[in-house]
Image (cartoon, rainbow, N blue to C red):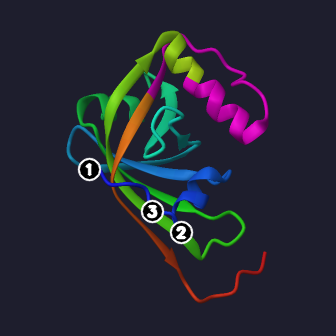
C-alpha cells in the first residue's frame, strides 16, 4: 500500500468525479465516472459504491485491480492518476452506508435510491500522482 500523497489528497477530498477503469471478462478495459471518497477508517484507502449487478461491480468482484483518473472540476488541467485494488467488500446495510456517505459528500443528502444489492468497495491505493499542466482553463 502506498500512502496517498499530500498533493493528491485535495482532489480526492473535493467533490470531483473519478473515472474508474476495470477489467472486462475478455481483458478489455471498461471505464465509468463515479463518486468516491476517503475511507473514514483508513485515510489512505478510498471508497466507491454501486449495485452488485453493475458492470463495474461484476468486474471488481472477478478482478480487484482498478485504475482511477480524477479531474479537478475547477481546473481540468489539474488531475490525479491512481491505481489500486479492492481489499474489502461491503454488502447490504454496510454497502448502503458507503453510498449514503458518498451521496452526502456530493449532494448533502443520503443516496436517494435503495437498490436490492448495494455494494461498497474499499480500495487500497498502490500508486498515486498529481499532474498539473501549464494551461489556463476558461469555462
What's the magenta region? 98-120
| Furthest residue in direction left, as rendered | 26
Which secondary structure lies at badge 1? loop
Give how far across and how far down residue 92 sits, in percent: 49, 11
Q: What residue is pinned by disc 3?
A: 5
Q: Which mark is residue 117?
A: none
Report the number of numbered marks: 3
Is the residue under label 2 in contact with that under label 1 (CB below 8 Å)? no
Of circles 3 and 1, the one toward us is 3
Of circles 1 and 2, the one toward us is 2
Give how far across and how far down residue 139 sits, in percent: 78, 75
Label 1 neighbour load within 10 Å: few <14, some 14-19, many 20+? few
Which secondary structure lies at badge 3? loop
Label 3 neighbour load within 10 Å: few <14, some 14-19, many 20+? few
Quadrant position of residue 16: bottom right
Name the residue at 78% across, 28% down: 109
Which secondary structure lies at badge 2? strand
Name the residue at 41% across, 33% down: 122
Can you say whether 89 is above or below 43 in the image? above
Label 2 neighbour load within 10 Å: few <14, some 14-19, many 20+? some
Quadrant position of residue 71: bottom right
Give how far across and how far down residue 138 sits, in percent: 77, 81
Name the residue at 31% across, 51% down: 29
Q: Indicate which disc, 2 or 3, sits on the residue closer to the N terminus.
A: 3
Residue toward you, 26 or 43: 43
Q: Which mark is residue 79?
A: 2
Spatial separation of the CA atoms under disc 1 and disc 2: 24 Å
Q: What residue is pinned by disc 1?
A: 28
Q: Is residue 116 magenta?
A: yes
Spatial separation of the CA atoms under disc 2 and disc 3: 13 Å
Q: Is residue 39 magenta?
A: no
Of circles 2 and 3, the one toward us is 3
Amino acid at each position: 500500500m502506498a500512502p496517498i500523497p499530500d498533493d493528491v489528497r485535495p482532489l480526492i477530498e473535493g467533490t470531483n468525479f473519478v473515472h474508474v477503469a476495470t477489467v472486462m471478462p475478455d481483458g478489455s478495459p471498461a471505464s465509468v465516472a463515479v463518486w468516491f471518497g476517503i475511507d473514514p477508517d483508513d485515510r489512505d484507502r478510498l471508497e466507491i459504491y454501486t449495485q452488485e449487478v453493475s458492470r463495474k461491480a461484476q468486474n471488481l468482484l472477478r478482478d480487484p485491480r482498478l485504475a482511477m483518473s480524477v479531474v479537478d472540476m475547477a481546473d481540468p488541467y489539474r488531475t490525479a492518476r491512481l491505481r489500486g485494488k479492492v481489499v474489502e467488500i461491503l454488502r447490504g446495510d454496510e454497502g448502503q452506508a458507503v453510498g449514503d456517505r458518498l451521496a452526502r459528500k456530493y449532494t448533502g443528502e443520503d443516496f436517494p435510491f435503495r437498490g436490492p444489492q448495494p455494494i461498497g468497495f474499499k480500495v487500497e491505493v498502490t500508486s498515486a500522482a498529481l499532474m498539473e499542466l501549464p494551461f489556463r482553463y476558461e469555462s
